[in-house]
Amino acid sequence: MSQVRKNDHNLMRVLLGPVISEKATMVAEKNEQVVFQVARDANKSDVKQAVELLFKVQVDSVQIVNQKGKPKRYGRLKVVVTTLRRPT
């Protein structure tokens, strides 16, 4: 039976999902990198540990980009969509 550490449950919540876009696909093909959307409170070491735990790979480095949400209009209202955080 595999041992699950208490911290592993927190690491499972760091990665929210993969980013599927044209730019992410080009980065994956060219640089052998993967793009994920991560939790706002995650730091580089959390992301590195989460990827190594889930995918059983060795991570060389992590780069994080904070992407500001785009303003959207609903009639007269102007609302800002939530900000994304992506490691590349």
Image (cartoon, grey):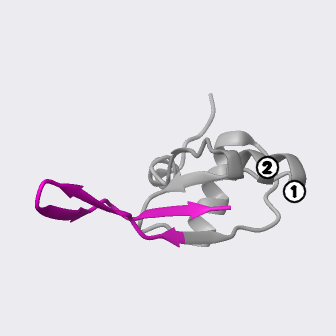
Residue drawn at point x = 82 percent, y = 54 percent? 58
Front one among 68 and 31? 68
- Residue furthest out toward the right: 30
Image depth: mark 1 or mark 2 in front: 2
SS for callout 1: helix
Would residue 16 be counted in the magenta stretch?
Answer: no
Question: Which amino acid type is marked by label 1?
Answer: Asn
* Side (left or right) of 54 relative to 66: right
Would residue 80 be counted in the magenta stretch?
Answer: yes
Q: Report the span colored magenta.
A: 66-88
Location of residue 13 with respect to 72 vertically, above or below: above
Q: Estimate the x, y position of residue 27 in percent, counting from the top left.
A: 78, 54
Front one among 30 and 13? 30
Question: Which amino acid type is marked by label 2?
Answer: Met
The numbered mark at residue 31 is 1
First reached walking from the N terminus: tag 1 or tag 2: 2
Q: Estimate the x, y position of residue 31 in percent, counting from the top left.
A: 87, 56
The rendered magenta stretch, by its main secondary structure, is classed as strand
**How far apart in space, not on screen, are marks 1 and 2 (Cα)?**
8 Å
Residue drawn at point x = 79 percent, y = 59 percent? 59
Which residue is denoted by mark 2 in the rendering?
A: 26
Front one among 51 and 71? 71
SS for callout 2: helix
